[in-house]
Amino acid sequence: MQLDQNPFFRKTITPWYDSNLACWGLIWSMVLVFCFGVGGVIVANNDPALGPHIWFPLLLAGLSGFLVVKVYGRLNNRINNE
């Protein structure tokens, strides 16, 4: 007889690094990193000597924004499924 892999009486246990508090902490820290990256883009646009290096703050802002969207989507999905 096969065991039921997903019994209805058990709640899934989320690890500490995927808890709601950790997700909100990650979102807020990535929002700060996003603001830092946008500030770097503004500074690089104003100084012609820094023009070739604008890729770094753009990459920083883009990756942190992507991470905010993905973690918020995971958090929203978990809250709606409970």
Image (cartoon, grey):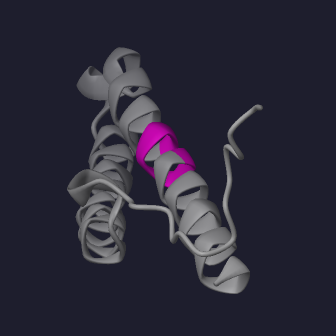
Name the main secondary structure of what is drawn in magenta: helix
Residue closer to the observer: 32 or 44: 32
Q: Is residue 64 magenta?
A: yes
**Is 4 on the left-hand or right-hand side of 55?**
right
Q: In this view, does 23 lie above or below 34?
A: below
Residue closer to the observer: 37 or 17: 17
Residue closer to the observer: 30 or 42: 30
Is residue 80 in sight in this rendering? yes
Q: Give the range drawn in magenta.
A: 62-66
Across and down, in percent, residue 78 comes to 60, 72
Across and down, in percent, residue 72 comes to 55, 68
Residue at left offset 33%, top offset 46%: 46
Q: Which residue lies furthest to the right in this view?
A: 1
Q: In which quarter of the image is residue 3?
A: top right
Residue at left offset 48%, top offset 59%: 68
**Is 81 on the left-hand or right-hand side of 35?**
right
Q: Is residue 5 above or below residue 48?
A: below
The N terminus, quarter of image? top right
Q: Is residue 55 magenta?
A: no
Is residue 33 in sight in this rendering? no
Across and down, in percent, residue 20 comes to 36, 75
Q: Quadrant of residue 34?
A: bottom left
Residue at left offset 56%, top offset 47%: 66
Across and down, in percent, residue 51 comes to 38, 24
